[in-house]
């Protein structure tokens, strides 16, 4: 059972400080707790029509014909649109975030079950949905490619015959590291361990499904689009390119968002259909996915089939890591990642260890499954990388008969080695791993747990202790390296202080539950001394915020948070000049104490930021060359990523008779640099850990051999509940980022990245008496039982 | 939001009125009780009906738990939550509370009914296994108030098919009460609120430490839940022992017909049938003894 604690008294520690960083209740909570959030589906416009999408019932088929006449005649129907009609407007295909193309509505073939085939616009949702039943599509069903391992076999059905000259299902190859150097190190190593490891396809499954309300005003020539997007500005630019509407005539509004986890980064066909529909009908049009549509058609995550190899000395020095990956990208390559990183940031698979060589070779293939590969709380494939390295390190510990904690401690990158360039070229900004690991071990009572385990094993009970230590790379990213479809991954921020000393800060990122309205108010408050309650945070509306690439990959605090701190400092700099005029001293004689400037040596002479704001807008003179107003704007281009780290320890009990896994304890020590609001950080960690329990123990989007999706409802695709999770034990260390203005590193995805390997390592540890070294997720009772009997198999 | 196909809706205020409506509207009509099995299927458009006859107003007439000297009677509209919380039921048949604790979640349990569970005839339905274990009989009422009593063994005629005819309603479940009884339920699920991977119910009746009768019922391991006569035959007249339970488990494993699916492999389910039958019998015996 999960116990609910009273909120500790320390909860309001921010009350003791006037303003700034610290534990503080979320400003957005009153709205959400009272049911007053405003989501896309809450948008109601006069005369609004409803759109429903007809989806492919099979995974792979040629479309021979579509008869829409009965649907058109159905009561309340205003329009029925097929791919052929879109093709006439050159809108049947759209670019994906990975420079591939994806069908908006299928014209030639359907390539995955659930693919968009046609849409109906009608007076209400029911009429639209009823009319779908009346569309008659004639299919010539083709053999599907379901297993990525067979996608490149000669004679495999060709999925992407739409691509000129394409003769197989190959999507891309990618490599990183030094193959020859790695081979050499492996050649002379005492011990080499290799292990096949699958990270199954999972789905972000946010509580709110995807949807949009599109409203084209033909008189103004302006398109307003309320949509479930984590990246409103990037979407606007892409709509301008795809739909040919000038960018300044498009307003993308991302209102309250009910969870994203990467699911709401891509542009989905449904959004484009809604835009087409409003233009065709001249009316506002709402499209809202149902749960099954979200699960079968929107961006999945993971689906990496990996082989990990690790080389070490007999006494446990890790020398090299090598991996070979087969990546299943589904029917269209819709991976959301910086363009030069087709495998995201998988290159950090060397983990937190100081090794001599590393190499990865990856082949990505097309299959007849939904496209995507989104950053599902993974900082662009770091989840897969961390899982690989933390699993393979445990395999090595098993081979060497060494304690997995000791093996990790022995191989950590040492604090004096930072900034540390990995063998795959990533420059870790800062880190101090051992104290984080030791703290987790102390909190867990690691030695006592091992003793308990020994006693239990002697009695035939199955208890496991799993460790994972991760380093993440978040906050994409420096624009010289990172862009999405040519858009640099920088973020703007604008701060305006009103005459009465209240302020508004406008962000380019968009919250899906991360608490931006609080965190960003606190960042600004810390810098200019205006209380967070007096700072309004505006986000998610392209007409009212500066350009930037949005929230995913834990990038809001590292990138936009830096922008907010720096823009506040710019405002403070101007305030200082105004203050010098007000106090009639030189700028150099002023001292800043949160919220006010004081004259050095004469602390009685002081002006507050509020007084300065009034002066800035007032009638009196301002210092020479200073314009009125108190505001500024900035675009922040990060010089590097930030690299949070953490040590996670999981304790599980496995029922020997039923093979059910119970997560008994979970200790998570996170180091995300400077902590802005510890309560929000803990919330992010709790959510991520819960997510990790889901992936480790139950979640998987499976397909049958015909390519039918077996995870099309929440009865089939299980997500964890409060009953599956223990009372989380969280701790922290602080290693600030040297290049971030306030030293913060981002924490949104840490727990999702770090927890699956800790849980799997714990289960595998529990099964040691059965000689188990590895078992793939999801570790359902049936799959654990298979492992106990020596039949661990990759999931299908 | 998933939206069902168009249908018409009537609300019945008496059992006989509901039967009259069924008679008049024919096979295109369906009763809706808690709706937690029917409505999800309709929203996914796996099932479409012209008419729904809402029988929730019959709860006053058909929502009850009535203990008696020889029989305990439960009205078909009794909700999961009422079954979970009834002290009288727990005293007579603790298997109900065991099962209800692991059926779905509070939202479903607040509305879902015993009658709906049995009439849905899903092979994974926990209450079907419970009723099979307890050798229940089902009272079915038809036009003109005619009632017939069907034993559990004959109630389910196939997956999703019952002995309830077109213009009939299941009104009551009767459970024979015998002295010296104990019962228990065991379920393995992948996650709280999930349907069973396998579950097993067991009931034993002891006299002076010797088994007078024993029954077991399984869910999710075959087209329909079945009592397992082999287990009854094995245990009758014997003193329960670990060795006997072991054999009973083996009989359970042999008597079922599981298929491999996302919940687990057929082999695993067979293993669970044995393991859970053993566990349920063990607890049932403990309870019968105390
Ligand atoms: C998320 C979820 C999880 C669930 N998990 C479980 C679980 O773990 N274990 C489990 O056993 N069940 C589970 N269920 C099913 C739940 O127990 C249902 O409520 C129950 O099976 C059906 O009861 P109902 O009253 O809702 O029936 P309804 O959905 O109203 O009806 C089901 C069928 O029975 C018919 N019917 C209903 N009452 C009568 C009557 N008196 N006479 C004749 N026909 C009748 C209806 O016409 C319909 O065909 C779950 C359901 C959900 C939604």
Image (spheres, coloured by chain):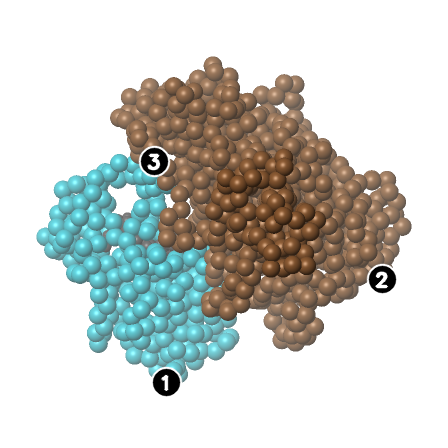
Q: Disc 2 versus disc 3: distance between alpha carbons? A: 67 Å
Image mark for residue B208: 1
Q: How many marks?
A: 3
Q: Ligand 1 near label 2 (Cβ, under 8 Å)?
A: no
Please rate how many residues cluster around mark 3, counting C-alpha atoms within 10 Å: few if below 14, some from 14 to 19, many from 20. few
The answer to whether residue A542 of the structure is visible from this angle is: yes
Q: Please state if A228 lies on the left or on the right of B88 as rendered.
A: right
Dividing the picture into quarters, in which one does residue A591 lie?
bottom right
Q: Disc 1 versus disc 3: distance between alpha carbons? A: 72 Å
Residue B49 coordinates in the image, percent (x, y): 26, 40
Q: Quadrant of the C terminus of chain B?
A: bottom left
Nearer the viewer's eye, disc 2 or disc 1? 2
Q: Residue at x 45, y 51 (%)?
A: A28
Residue B223 coordinates in the image, percent (x, y): 39, 52
Which color was chain A given? brown
Q: Please state if B95 lies on the left or on the right of A181 as rendered.
A: left
Residue A728 coordinates in the image, percent (x, y): 56, 63
């Amino acid at each position: 059972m999960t116990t609910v604690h009273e909120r500790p008294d320390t909860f309001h520690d921010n009350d003791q400080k006037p303003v700034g960083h610290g534990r503080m209740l979320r400003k957005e909570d009153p709205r959400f707790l009272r049911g007053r959030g405003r989501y896309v589906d809450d948008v109601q416009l006069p005369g609004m029509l409803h759109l429903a999408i007809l989806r492919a019932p099979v995974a792979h088929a040629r479309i021979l014909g579509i008869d829409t006449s009965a649907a058109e005649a159905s009561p309340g129907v205003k329009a029925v649109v097929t791919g052929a009609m879109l093709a006439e407007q050159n809108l049947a295909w759209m670019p994906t975030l990975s420079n591939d193309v994806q069908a908006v509505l299928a014209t030639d073939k359907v390539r995955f079950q659930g693919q968009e085939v046609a849409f109906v616009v009608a007076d209400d949702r029911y009429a639209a949905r009823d009319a779908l039943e009346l569309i008659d599509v004639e299919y010539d069903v083709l053999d599907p490619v379901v297993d990525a391992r067979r996608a490149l076999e000669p004679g495999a059905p060709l999925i992407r015959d739409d691509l000129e000259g394409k003769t197989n299902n190959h999507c891309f190859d990618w490599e990183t590291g030094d193959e020859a150097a790695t081979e050499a190190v492996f050649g002379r190593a005492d011990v080499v361990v290799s292990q096949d490891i699958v990270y199954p396809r999972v789905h972000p499954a946010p509580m709110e499904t995807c949807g949009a309300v599109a409203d084209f005003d033909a008189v103004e020539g302006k398109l307003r689009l309320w949509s479930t997007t984590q990246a409103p500005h990037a979407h606007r630019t892409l709509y301008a390119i795809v739909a040919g509407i000038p960018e300044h005539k498009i307003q993308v509004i991302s209102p309250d968002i009910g969870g994203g986890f990467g699911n709401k980064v891509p542009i989905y066909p449904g959004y484009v259909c809604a835009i087409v529909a409003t233009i065709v009908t001249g009316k506002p049009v709402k499209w809202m996915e149902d749960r099954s549509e979200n699960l079968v058609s929107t961006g999945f995550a993971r689906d990496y089939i990996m082989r990990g190899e690790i080389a070490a000395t007999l006494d446990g020095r890790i020398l090299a890591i090598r991996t070979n990956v087969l990546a299943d990208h589904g029917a269209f390559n819709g991976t959301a990642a910086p363009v030069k990183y087709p495998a995201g940031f998988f290159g950090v698979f060397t983990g937190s260890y100081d090794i001599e060589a590393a190499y990865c070779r990856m082949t990505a293939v097309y299959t007849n499954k939904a496209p995507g590969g989104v950053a599902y709380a993974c900082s662009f494939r770091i989840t897969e990388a961390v899982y690989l390295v933390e699993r393979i390190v445990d395999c090595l510990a098993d081979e060497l008969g060494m304690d997995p904690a000791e093996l990790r401690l022995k191989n950590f990158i040492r604090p004096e080695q930072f900034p540390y360039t990995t063998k795959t070229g990533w420059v870790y900004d800062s880190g101090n791993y051992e104290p984080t690991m030791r703290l987790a071990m102390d909190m867990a009572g690691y030695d006592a747990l091992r003793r308990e385990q020994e006693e239990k094993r002697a009695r035939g009970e199955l208890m496991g202790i799993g460790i994972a230590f991760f380093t993440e790379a978040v906050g994409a990213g420096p624009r010289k390296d990172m862009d999405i479809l040519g858009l640099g991954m920088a973020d703007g921020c604008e701060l305006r202080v009103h005459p009465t000393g209240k302020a508004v800060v406008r962000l380019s990122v968009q919250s899906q539950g991360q608490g931006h309205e609080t965190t960003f108010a606190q960042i600004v408050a810390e810098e200019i001394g205006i209380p967070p309650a007096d700072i309004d945070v505006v986000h998610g509306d392209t007409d009212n915020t500066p350009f930037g690439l949005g929230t995913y990959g834990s990038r809001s605090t590292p990138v936009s948070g830096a922008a907010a701190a720096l823009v506040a400092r710019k405002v403070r700099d101007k305030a200082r000049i105004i203050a010098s005029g007000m106090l009639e001293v030189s700028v150099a004689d002023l001292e800043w104490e949160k919220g006010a400037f004081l004259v050095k040596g004469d602390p009685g002479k002081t002006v507050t930021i509020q007084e300065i704001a009034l002066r800035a807008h007032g009638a009196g003179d301002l210092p020479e060359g200073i314009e009125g107003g108190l505001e500024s704007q900035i675009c922040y281009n990060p010089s590097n990523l930030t690299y949070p780290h953490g040590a996670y320890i999981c304790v599980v009990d496995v029922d020997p008779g039923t093979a059910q896994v119970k997560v008994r304890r979970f200790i998570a020590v996170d180091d995300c640099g400077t902590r802005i609001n510890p309560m929000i950080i803990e919330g992010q960690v709790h959510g991520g850990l819960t997510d990790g329990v889901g992936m480790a123990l139950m979640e998987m989007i499976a397909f049958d051999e015909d390519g039918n999706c077996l995870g099309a409802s929440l009865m089939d695709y299980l997500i964890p509940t409060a009953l599956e999770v223990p009372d989380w034990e969280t701790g922290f260390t602080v290693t600030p980022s040297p290049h971030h203005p306030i030293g913060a590193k981002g924490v949104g995805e840490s727990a999702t990245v770090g927890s699956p390997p800790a849980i799997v390592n714990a289960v595998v540890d529990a099964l040691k008496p059965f000689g188990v070294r590895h078992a793939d997720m999801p570790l359902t009772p049936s799959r654990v039982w298979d492992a106990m009997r020596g039949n661990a198999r990759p999931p299908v | 939001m998933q939206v069902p196909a168009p249908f018409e809706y009537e609300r019945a205020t008496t059992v006989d009125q509901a039967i009259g409506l069924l008679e008049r509207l024919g096979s295109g009509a369906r009763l809706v009780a808690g709706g937690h099995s029917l409505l999800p299927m309709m929203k996914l458009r796996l099932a479409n009906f012209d008419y729904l006859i809402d029988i929730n107003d019959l709860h006053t007439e058909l929502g009850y738990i009535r203990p008696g000297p020889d029989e305990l009677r439960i009205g078909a509209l009794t909700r999961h939550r009422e079954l979970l919380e009834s002290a009288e039921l727990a005293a007579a048949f603790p298997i109900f509370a065991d099962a209800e604790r692991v059926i779905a979640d509070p939202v479903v349990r607040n509305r879902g009914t015993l009658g709906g569970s049995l009439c849905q005839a899903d092979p994974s339905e926990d209450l079907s296994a419970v009723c099979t274990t307890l050798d229940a009989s089902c009272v079915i009422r038809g036009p003109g108030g005619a009632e017939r009593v069907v034993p559990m063994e004959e109630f389910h005629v196939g997956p999703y098919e019952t002995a309830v005819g077109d213009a009939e309603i299941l009104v009551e479940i009767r459970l024979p009460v015998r002295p010296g009884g104990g019962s228990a339920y065991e379920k393995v699920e992948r996650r709280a609120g999930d349907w069973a991977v396998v579950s097993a119910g067991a009931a034993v009746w002891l006299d002076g430490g010797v088994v007078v009768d024993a029954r077991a019922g399984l869910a999710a391991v075959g087209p329909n839940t079945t009592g397992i006569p082999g287990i009854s035959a094995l245990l009758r007249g014997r003193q329960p022992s670990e060795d006997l339970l072991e054999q009973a488990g083996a009989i359970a494993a042999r008597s079922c017909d599981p298929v491999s699916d996302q919940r687990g492999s057929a082999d695993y389910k067979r293993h669970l049938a044995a393991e859970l039958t053993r566990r349920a019998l063990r607890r049932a015996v403990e309870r019968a003894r105390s």
